[in-house]
Amino acid sequence: MVQGTISPSVYSLRRRGQVVRLIDTPGFDDSKRSDIDVLTDLAFHLASAYQTNPKILLSGIIYLHPIDQPKLAGTARKNLAMFKLLCGDESLQSVVLATTMWRDEIQADAAQRVAQLESTPEYWGRMIEHGSSVFRHDNTPESALRIIDHIIARRERIVLSIQKQMVDEHRTIDQTSAGQLERHEIIKEKERAARRLEENREELEASLRAKEQQNVHQLSEEQQKYEREIQQKDHDIEALRMSVAELQKQKEAQMVREEEKLQTFYAQQDAKYAEMSRELAALLQQDTQVSSDNKGSLLTVQEKQGGQKESAAAAAAAASSQEDKAIVERMMNKMNDTGLRIQMLSEQMDAIENERRMLKAQEKKKFAKRGMQYGGAGGAFGGIAAGAAMLCSVM
C-alpha cells in the first residue's frame, strides 16, 4: 500500500522466462484520500481480480518498511494491522517483509530496529512464525530482483483473506476482518466527536448566559464542525456496507460520471479552440490588409520626403512633420497590436492542444500496463512510506 498512489497500477518485467507483474496499490493515511476510499478501492480491485474467469491469483506480497524510522508510530501500527487482516494468516507465508532506506550512518541502529521488529509478536514476530520472510532492500536493482526471485522460486498461488470473504463468502466490506477494524476506528472517532460536541454545547450555553459574544461565535463554529464530523462518520460507516456487486455498480457509475465530465470538458475546449481559430483567421486577414495600407502610408510619407525608399523604421526616424510621424505611429501600432494578438492566440491554441494530448495519454495509462525493465525494479521498491506494499503476480 503505497502512499501517493491513487489507484492500483501495474508494472511488468520478464524474469527467468516468466512475466512478473508488480501491482502498486493505494496506501492508507493518505493526505489526498480517506482510509475508507482506500479500503473500498483495494477491496474492489482485489475482489474483481479474484472473481474473473480464470481467476487472477497473486504469487506474493512485498511489504516495504523504511528502516530509518526509529519506531512504529500509531499510524504505521494501524497500517500493519490492516495489512495482516487483508492478507489473513494463511497468506502470511507468501509475504516478504523488506526493509528500505538503509544508509551507512544508521547501520547499527537499523540492525537493532530489525531485531525488534522480528522479535515483537504484534509487529513482525507473529508474521514470521506464519512463514513470512525478511529481506533487506538497499535500493539497487540487484536487491529488488533477489526479492522477486524468492517469490518466483516459491511457485505459490495465494488467495487473500479479503478476497475469500467478499467473493466466496459474499460478505460486505464491513463484515470482512479488515472492514471490521476500519469500522471500529470510525466508531471510536465518532464517539470522540460526540463527546467533544456535548462538552462544547455546555460551554456554549454558559457563554450565552454570560453574554460572551466572541466566545459564543467561536463555540458555535466548533459545534458545527463536530456535527459535520459526526455526519461524515455515519456516511463512512454506511460506505462500508457494500458487496462486490454494489462496488462494481459504484465504480461503473463513477466511470460514467468521469467520462461525461471529460467529454464536457473536451466540448468546451473544442468550442474555445474553434472560436480562437476564427479570430486568428480574421486577424491574419486584417494583418494582410494593414500591411497593404501601411505600404501606401509609407509611400505617402516617402513621396513627401523626396521619394526615398526607406523602411518603416527609417521612415519613422526621418519623418519631418507631425502629420507624417502620426501616420507612421498609427501604422506601427496596428502592426504591433495585431502581431501580439496573433501570437497570444497561437500560444493559447497550442496550450489547448497540449492539454488534450496530456489528457488522452492519462486515459490511455488507465488501461495500459506500465513497463518496467530490470533496472527499474530498484527504484520501484525505494523511497516509499511506512507500511507500503506491492502485490506480485507471476504468470
Image: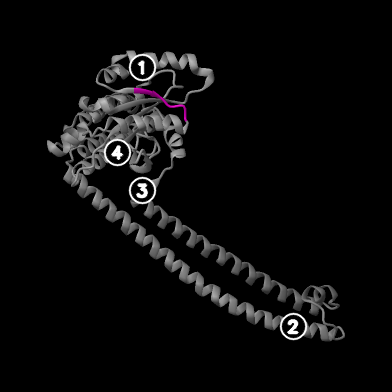
Q: Mark 3 and mark 4: span between their CA atoms?
A: 13 Å
Q: Earlier in the sequence, mark 3 or mark 4?
A: 3
Residue in the picture at 37% in, 30% down: 147
Residue in the picture at 83% in, 86% down: 303
Nearer to us: label 1 or label 2: 1
Q: Amino acid at mark 2?
A: Ser
Q: Mark 1 and mark 3: span between their CA atoms?
A: 35 Å
Callout 1 crowding tier (Cα within 10 Å): few <14, some 14–19, many ≥20? some
Among the 4 quarters of the image, the one containing residue 327 = bottom right
Q: Earlier in the sequence, mark 1 or mark 4?
A: 1
Label for residue 129? none
Q: Earlier in the sequence, mark 1 or mark 2?
A: 1
Q: Does dot 1 land on a helix, a strand or a loop?
A: helix
**Residue placed most toward the observer, 357 or 12:** 12
Q: Mark 1 and mark 4: span between their CA atoms?
A: 26 Å
Q: Does dot 4 land on a helix, a strand or a loop?
A: strand
Position of residue 219 in the picture relative to residue 292 (left or right): left
Position of residue 362 in the picture relative to residue 342 (left or right): left
Q: Mark 4 and mark 2: span between their CA atoms?
A: 76 Å
**Where residue 81 sits: x, y (%)?**
28, 24
Nearer to us: label 1 or label 4: 4
Label for residue 369? 3
Residue pointed to by mark 2 = 297
Which quarter of the image is occupied by the N terminus? top left
Q: Is residue 316 above or below residue 348?
A: below
Residue pointed to by mark 4 = 393
Q: Mark 3 and mark 2: span between their CA atoms?
A: 63 Å
Q: Earlier in the sequence, mark 1 or mark 3?
A: 1
Residue pointed to by mark 1 = 117
Q: Is residue 76 above or below residue 231?
A: above
